[in-house]
Image (spheres, rainbow, N blue to C red):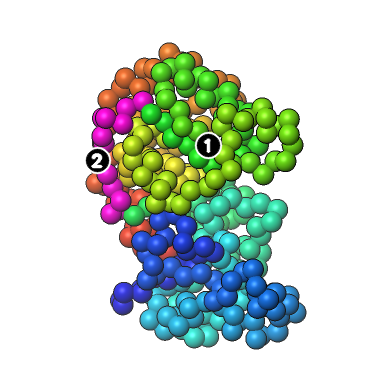
């Protein structure tokens, strides 16, 4: 196969680690989403006037050399798979949910090949009949364990109703001797609510490159899933590939081959606070390095090959 045997369509390819795959990942549109041309596109799209495909991105120019196209949930636009097959009838097209399905995200209803819809959330696979596919992370980012990072914990993320719990959890973590750098982004405009969380609120998101630099200097990552979410998050992937300990409320993580109790601390599933003594014992346990087999099983290569099977 050619270099572009797999093309990814992702809503904002400048985010996360996707710039590492700059020759393989493309934005769905060739126009800014905040522009007059985008409004024109939406009008044509809603009216189903075929001219709307002219506004799609550069990925259109690479279809003939692609063995498969994987469209991420928020990158999908109705009719993409039909368009791709007109250009390259032999190309496999898959829709991949790396977010959970919600009221605003129902692209699975538009995608025509229901057997080619995948999700990284086992609950959504069961509910909607999707095929399971794991998350992935660049194998090249692997960093060996650094004991000097010790008891420093880092978390930055959206509130999503988790703020009060995370604030209470921070106090329990600190009681166990963990130094917490927790930054919460909240869309709430309620003065009382924001004031209650003022010690962890931030108004500044950070580029992923800066995020990784901060993460590299910490020994522990915090992972709090949304209610109803069982999928592994990016923080889980980062904990594996950057060799960090992980504190998470995702009980399903025990079902994965890489689960190691020395490396992963499970929070109570009812959102009660953990015993600081249990956290202290977790900190004292030696980190167990992840094997090459584990890293390979969560790599981009393994991920993309899973769609081609």
The answer to whether one can see residue 62 in this image is yes
Label 1 element class: strand
Is 74 or 193 nearer to us in this picture?
193
131 lies above or below 271? below
Q: Which residue is mark 2?
A: 144
Horizontally, residue 189 falls left or right of residue 286, namely right
Q: Is residue 149 magenta?
A: yes
Residue at 65% across / 57% down in the picture? 105
Q: Which quadrant of the figure has residue 42?
A: bottom right
Label 2 element class: loop
Residue at 68% across / 76% down in the picture? 36
Q: Residues within 10 Å of mark 2 (few under 14, many from 20)?
A: few
**Percent of width and height locating residue 77:** 61, 71
**Percent of width and height locating residue 285:** 31, 22
Is 153 or 294 nearer to us in this picture?
153
Residue at 52% across / 54% down in the picture? 98
Q: Which quadrant of the figure has residue 40?
A: bottom right
Task: Give the mark nearer the N terminus: 1 vs 2.
Answer: 2
Q: Residues within 10 Å of mark 1 (few under 14, many from 20)?
A: some
35 lies above or below 277? below
**Percent of width and height locating residue 145:** 26, 36
The numbered dot on residue 183 is: 1
Is 269 or 14 nearer to us in this picture?
14
The answer to whether one can see residue 95 in this image is no
Horizontally, residue 219 falls left or right of residue 95, namely left
The span shown in magenta is: 139-151
189 lies above or below 61? above
Quarter of the image with the N terminus in it: bottom left
State how far apart marks 1 and 2 are (Cα).
Answer: 26 Å
Residue at 40% across / 62% down in the picture? 19
Task: Indicate which label's residue lies in the foreground, 1 or 2.
Answer: 1
Q: Is residue 225 magenta?
A: no
């Amino acid at each position: 196969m050619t270099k572009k045997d797999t093309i990814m369509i992702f809503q904002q390819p400048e985010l996360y680690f996707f710039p590492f795959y700059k020759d393989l990942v493309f934005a769905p549109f060739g126009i800014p989403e905040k522009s007059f041309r985008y409004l024109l596109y939406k009008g044509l799209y809603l009216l189903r006037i075929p001219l709307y495909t002219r506004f799609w991105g550069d990925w259109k120019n690479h279809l003939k050399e692609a063995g498969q196209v994987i469209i991420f949930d928020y990158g999908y636009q109705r009719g993409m798979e039909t368009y791709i097959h007109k250009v390259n009838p032999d190309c496999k097209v898959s829709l991949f949910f790396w977010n959970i399905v919600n009221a605003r995200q129902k692209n699975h209803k538009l995608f025509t090949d229901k057997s080619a819809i995948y999700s990284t959330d086992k609950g959504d696979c069961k509910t909607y009949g999707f095929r399971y596919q794991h998350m992935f992370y660049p194998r090249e980012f692997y960093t060996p364990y650094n004991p000097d990072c010790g008891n420093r914990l880092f978390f930055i993320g959206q509130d999503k109703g988790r703020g009060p719990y995370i604030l209470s959890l921070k106090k329990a973590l600190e009681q166990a001797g963990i130094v917490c750098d927790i930054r919460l982004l909240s869309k709430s405009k309620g003065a009382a609510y924001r004031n209650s969380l003022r010690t962890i609120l931030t108004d500044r998101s950070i580029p992923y490159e800066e995020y990784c630099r901060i993460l590299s200097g910490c020994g522990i990552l915090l992972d709090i899933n949304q209610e109803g979410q069982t999928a592994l998050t990016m923080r889980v992937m980062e904990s594996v590939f950057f060799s960090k300990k992980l504190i998470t409320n995702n009980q399903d993580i025990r079902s994965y081959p890489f689960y190691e109790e020395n490396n992963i601390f499970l929070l109570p599933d009812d959102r009660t606070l953990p015993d600081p003594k249990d956290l202290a014992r977790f900190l004292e346990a030696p980190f167990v390095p992840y094997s090459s087999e584990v890293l390979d099983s969560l790599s981009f290569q393994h991920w993309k090959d899973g769609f081609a099977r």
